[in-house]
Image (cartoon, rainbow, N blue to C red):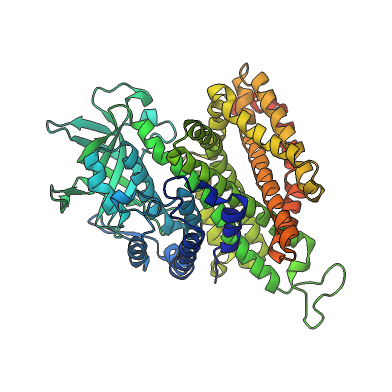
Amino acid sequence: MPTYKAPLEDVSFLLNDVFQIDRYNNLPGFSDASADVRAAILNEAAKFSEQVLQPLNSVGDLEGCTRHDDGRVTTPSGFKNAFKQMGEGGWLGLSGPAEFGGQGLPATLSQVVNEFMISANMAFSLYPALTQGAMATLLVYGTPEQKQTFVPNMMAGKWAGTMNLTEPQCGTDLGLLRTKAVKQTDGTYKITGTKIFISGGEQDLTENIIHLVLARIEGAPAGIKGISLFAVPKMTIKLDGSLAGPNGVSCGSIEHKMGIHGNSTCVLNFDNAVGTLVSQENKGMSAMFVMMNGARLGVGVQGLAQSEVAYQNAAIYARERLQGRALTGSQAKDKPADPIIIHPDVRCTLMTIRAFNEAARALVVWTSLKSDLAHRSDDAKEREAADDHMGLLTPVVKALLTDIGFANAVSAQQMFGGHGYIAETGVEQFVRDARIAMIYEGANGIQALDLVGRKLGRDGGRAITAFVNEVSTFSKDNAANEAIAPYISPLGASIKDLQQSTMWLMQNGLAKPDNAGAASTDYLHLFGLVALGYMWARMAKVAQDKLAEAGEQPNLKAKLVTGKFFMERMLPETSLRLSRIQAGAASMMELPAEAF
């Protein structure tokens, strides 16, 4: 059976040593998250994830969700009680405003906690994740009445939330949506239409669900400019806050899907359901982007989380599985064979996954801190720089971490040989669950197009210039530090590849848009590798400094070795990506469509 242990030591190293989170104590909520408080919260999150959520992961996968004839949906055994514990433990409101029942702590802490929970049980984690995303949107764009009515109940875990975008005829191109909204004399709207792929669209975990629904008001402009956002409760709400009857929202079916079986992915039918406008008429997309951008970062964490749990189980198996003998001679002479961990190819696979996981976790923490700065700093310049970072890195975190996270889950499965294909070990579930993260919240090809087509040139390239300058300055400042030369020199080479590819796109992408499209995925991966390399260089510097101060520390020595592996074996891929980018789109676009 699979197992999971939250990476508390690694998280502590990142928060306390690499990013020195205490230096942000001037920001709201940070001073309340002292080192002792952080440790206590993360320890409890680890226990909840390991002891409550992880044992339910295979249960949810085997049982799935059940839709009854009357449209009700029941979730797998144990899910309802686990969600109740989540609400009572305050996990849904960890970073929420205190005035609505939250704890007001940094969002960075929530992202770390989310990684633990996703690794333990990805399907379950989607219920609170969508609820947190809906709350974030309501807190920014909701009316005072919407905030007061919905948010406290959602933070307490009594109510849940969803996002309703996709329809049968439109996914990424939401300008094609047909769900309509008809304004009533009392200022409410009646919503009619069908939404598909709605995570947690119907469930028995909470007494109410607040659906955030994109729809077009009668007479609104065509396309994306005519879309509005509405809050549509599953159950109608009386003036005193108590619940009345159903509100014209029903589950038409549950999707039969490859993975995340424990989450009820629903077709939802809205039949004159009463909703209230969120934000302004025809401004729905800007409001929904609060939820979508947060969700994209969260989905990136899903890629990391599945890679982490897959790695942990593969490493345990590699240490225990006896098969063959070492190339250099028998290592376990008292046993019939050596453990497969002695083979270089096995070690290469495990090191590749581990080196990604540790750098990806650092990238998530770094980006989460920028999110906190963007929302909590009182310095306009600091907020602007943080917002630039978020805009630039969001598609990278979403696409890179899920692409590589899925590949790592497959590689971890390979460690088990035939046993990896059998459900009993649990590793095949990691593969199936990880696959969806590359698709939903904007397929990864769309993320790459967003990066190349929108984010690079925004504000005259201010964000990419700041990123390149930061990495280049770090490299120059540490060029004379011989102790970390194995990390600085490869980083310098990779940043040159990034600069060359960016220049090539500027020169060849505008005149021939197909060149930009053909280069987009390679560019995103090149950019992401540089970001991961920068994380490794920063971690290596801190680890080396701590070793120089305190002497022998095995965990820090392991950190340096893992980082060196990344620099030697993984970061050089930037030159391959550069060559692909510079090849252009000619051969890719030459064949006529009928030749495929």
The residue shown at (42%, 52%) is 105
Measured along the vertical axis of the image, is residue 184 above or below residue 429? Answer: above
Number of numbered markers: 0
Q: Is residue 397 left or right of residue 117?
A: right
Q: Is residue 118 left or right of residue 271?
A: right
Q: Where residue 441 sits in the image (x, y, percent)?
A: 46, 41
The residue shown at (74%, 39%) is 477
Q: Is residue 135 left or right of residue 552?
A: left
Measured along the vertical axis of the image, is residue 488 above or below residue 465? Answer: below
Q: Residue furthest right?
A: 328
The residue shown at (66%, 33%) is 468
Which quadrant: the C terminus? Answer: top right
The residue shown at (62%, 51%) is 18
Q: Where residue 328 sits in the image (x, y, percent)?
A: 87, 68
Q: Nearer the viewer, residue 305 or 99?
A: 99
Q: Where residue 15 sits in the image (x, y, percent)?
A: 56, 54
Q: Residue furthest top?
A: 511
Residue 175 visible from this viewpoint: yes
Q: Residue furthest bottom?
A: 334
Q: Nearer the viewer, residue 151 or 444?
A: 151
Which quadrant: the N terminus? Answer: bottom right
Q: Nearer the viewer, residue 468 or 278?
A: 468
Residue 585 visible from this viewpoint: no
Measured along the vertical axis of the image, is residue 514 above or below residue 407? Answer: above
Q: Where residue 270 sits in the image (x, y, percent)?
A: 25, 41
